[in-house]
Image (tube, coloured by chain):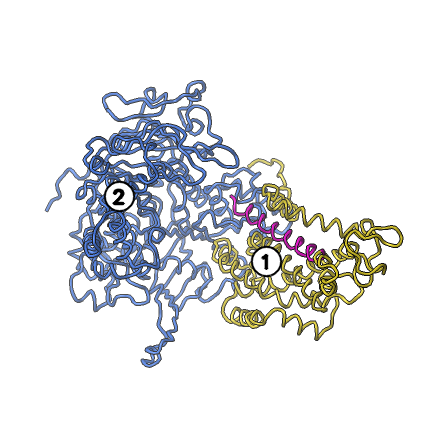
Chain colours: A yellow, B blue
Amino acid sequence: MTDQAVSVPRRESPMLRVVKGLALIRESPVGMTGLAIIVFWVLVAIFAPLLAPFPPNQPGLPLQPAGGAALDGGIYWLGTDQLGRDTLSRIIYGSRQVLLYAPLATFCAYLVGIPMGLAAGYRRGLVDDILSFIANVILSFPVLVLYIIIIATIGASGINIVIAVTFASAPGVMRIVRGLVLDLRNREYVFAAETRGETPWRIMLVEILPNARGPLIVDACLRLGYVVITIGTLGFLGLGLPPPDPDWGKMVSELRQFAIVDPLLAVYPCIAISSLVLGFNLLADGLREVSLRD
Amino acid sequence: MDSQAKSFDGPVLECRDLCISYFTRAGEIPAVIDFNMTLEQGGSIGLVGESGCGKSTVAMAIMRYLGGNGAIVGGQVFYKGRDMATFSEEELRQLRGNEIAMVYQEPMASLNPSMTLGRQLMEVPLCHENISEEEAYKRARQMLADVNLPDPDRIMSVYPHQISGGQQQRVVIAMALLSNPSLLLLDEPTTALDVTVEAGIIELIGQIAEKFNTSMVYISHNLGLILETCDRVNVMYSGVVVESGTVTEVFDHMRHPYTKGLFGCIPLPGASKTARPLVPIRGQLPLPHQRPPGCYFGPRCDFFQKGVCDREGLGMTSVPNEPGHDVRCRRWQEIDWDSYHPEGVGAGEMEPGEVVLSIDDMKKYYELTDNSIAALISGKRVRYVKANESISFDARSCQTVAIVGESGCGKSTFAKVLMGLETATDGKVVFNGKDISQEEVQKRTPEQIGSMQMVFQNPFDTLNPSHTVGSQLARVIRKFGVEKNKDRIEQRVMELLDLVKLPREFARRRPRQLSGGQKQRVGIARAFAGNPTTVVADEPVSALDVSVQAAVTGLLMDIQKTYRTTLIFISHDLSLVRYLADRVVVMYLGHIVEQGTTDEVFAPPYHPYTEALLSAVPIADTSVEKTRIILEGNLPSVTNPPSGCVFNTRCPRKIGEICETQDPPVVEPTPGHQIACHLSREELARMKPVIVMAEEASPPAAE
């Protein structure tokens, strides 16, 4: 060993690696379709003030059909609601709410579910029994009833939606993480970490969790889709964001009362919801497909 | 077609210039190139080679079952004189069950877990022939008896998980034989089994060839097994056959440098780490899409000559006077085969030092709580699994102590107690002057942990795929407090990579960019990060290819010599143990049955179990004669071990009731050589060696 200069290994940042991994999605047409839909909605949300022809809460001619003309010469491309607010503008502004609260709620569900799953899967025994019991109790409630109870208790607001969704989805996340950990904890690198006396939390977070990321990313995409539906459902039930802010679910519920006038009025926000959900599901499918290849 | 095919008397199978490719994202990848083989009726051909050489692909191509992305891109396969490309789908289906049968490595994967074995066996004749249920039952039962399964009636009525792995493999072979196939393809049929069980299966395969006149293609990475089962052998390397011929030709007068290299890598009797060390083949197997021009073995070959070996269009040439012995090498005639003995990596003499690790009457029991009603009534709710019973031995510095035994003998539990993942139930484990038997790893000091580390078995599992090699090594260095400063840690990581002879750039790589052998080297580097005095190696090379095995073994001994480390070498591979161990401890069902120096254990007097183990090991040397001892029965369950001597249920030398009732006394034929057996000293002294080299065997024993 001569005194040659030690080449210092450059560290690739973990973020960069995840991005690189996700870039593989290019090879899946299904995944790219999903990604395109999501990117479309993200752009819509960002540039809402530029795209929307009317302010979202400005009243005008009520219950206009699609393509009807406004008093100031503008066109209601997707018609108006009972207060004369432009449906298109409200869908555009509504995307901001969905795209803010759905990822936030999913993130929180993971934040709670992952440590629970890690602890249950790695520690096993009593910890596992207790955590799994709690998860089973929560999961055995009908989801809607659970949401109604939570929102009715703590009131309707954006942050309460996040709390409700976290409460209802964290057990599901926990179960997935637990299953993954049960497999990964028997790997030899985990034994190696144990034999050098690493603390359990370090083993869970550094040795086990990074290796579970693949399935978890796929699950997160699927779960985002479910959360979009959940937020829509809550809005439909009147448990979503307080009025007058535009909310896709609430729009469906309001406009469906006027199906006699024009059945199509309620369909437009439905299309918005389902397209976003479809986007997330296709992306999840694509990611799974790519990750299953070598 | 059927009657004509059954009565055909030419070669059963002929492959002519067979080329097989897989089509992937990266394009066409040739898996097998220019493969020729002729299998006569009743003959058996071995395909031998390291992983990735295309031997299984050949078998799948013969079955015409290459999956979605594989295809035969050139050449033909003739089955009984008829080109298989002309068979229709329906004919192929008939052929697969009826004429050609295949046995895979993992018996559980070939059996349906939700059907009784009898039902599964009966399906074969019911599906292919027009016979009654009773007739099918009779045939299936008879076949089970033919593959030497005890109590065929019981086996007919049970599910696959209710019998042992060796029995499962026998059932799979019975299933393959039921349709009376003309050709049997065996793809590593014993790799998943213990040696003593393997010996039984190998004996069975030999009998099949005689009894049923079945032709066989036997695929294995183990040259010793090929010697015991086949009459011809094809040695494959990176998709091509490099040498083919009869077993004696290829084993005794190999004419290809790769074959020669392969034999230099396996620890044959006579090889030893001091006198005749193993010679690893340098370099690595080329990836299928990065094969060098000309001879694929060129870059790793000692006889490589520019302009000769890297010319394209390398074909097989025949060895004169040995018809059927072909070699794919341009220079084989120029090589002086008799004087070619490449230098190996020897360890040299090592003088063992003071006692580092002393295990005294160590016991490890696991508690099982039985909640059944019967247990509640009888009051026997807690049962003990005696994983380790009265383990005692010493290990000195610079010494290699091998712990040998089959699966379930308690080797791994013992390692766990040493490493502090479990605490001992009783007894002492004195390490560097301190009893650590009751100290879990969290209670040990970083120095204590760092001075006893472990090398793991599975190279694909030993490194965390999410972190770079460098960061994993750095973590260990920091954890053991060897270095604190960031730059010094990096310096130390580089030194460790140098130590295991890996390029320094590897610090930045992720485990999936490394080959199996390289990963195992990193695993060794990790174990040596804390300057350990003792390293526990749990089957460190059993998952590696032979050529890599030799290199990793050599490296391990090299480092051991530098640091005067004590090596606890856990293994089931007796050839390797004989090669590198100084002392051997033989375990069976948690008990030590024999221990002593390597020479003492490998020479008579033996414990009957050691004797059986030794005879079961396949040896790739035609000059070696072995006594055949096939153990009957299965390994008993650890939850319910036999009384008296634990080996009494399978012991071929059982002397009577005393074996079942009394614990065997420990006999010391020579000081330090301990055998736990009821056999008298005289009987032990009368034992003959199991393995005899031909030269030594010639003078008749004086008796």
Whole-percent x, y for residue A289 in the image: 55, 47
The residue drawn where x is 55% and y is 42% is B495
Quarter residue B85 falls in: top left
Chain to which the residue tagged by mark 2 belongs: B
Bounds of the magenta segment: A268-294
Whole-percent x, y for residue B384 in the image: 35, 70
Estimate how packed mark 2 is, as few (under 14), some (14 to 19) or many (20 or more) residues with alpha carbons within 10 Å.
many
Q: Name the residue tied to disc 1.
A: A205
Count of residue discs: 2
Q: Is residue B605 visible?
A: no
Estimate how packed mark 1 is, as few (under 14), some (14 to 19) or many (20 or more) residues with alpha carbons within 10 Å.
some
Q: Name the residue tied to disc 2.
A: B98
The three-letter amino acid code for the residue at tag 1 is Leu
Tell me whether marks 1 and 2 sit on the same chain. no
Dividing the image into 4 quarters, which one contains the N terminus of chain A? top right
Chain to which the residue tagged by mark 1 belongs: A
The residue drawn where x is 45% and y is 42% is B517
| Residue B286 inside the magenta-drawn segment | no
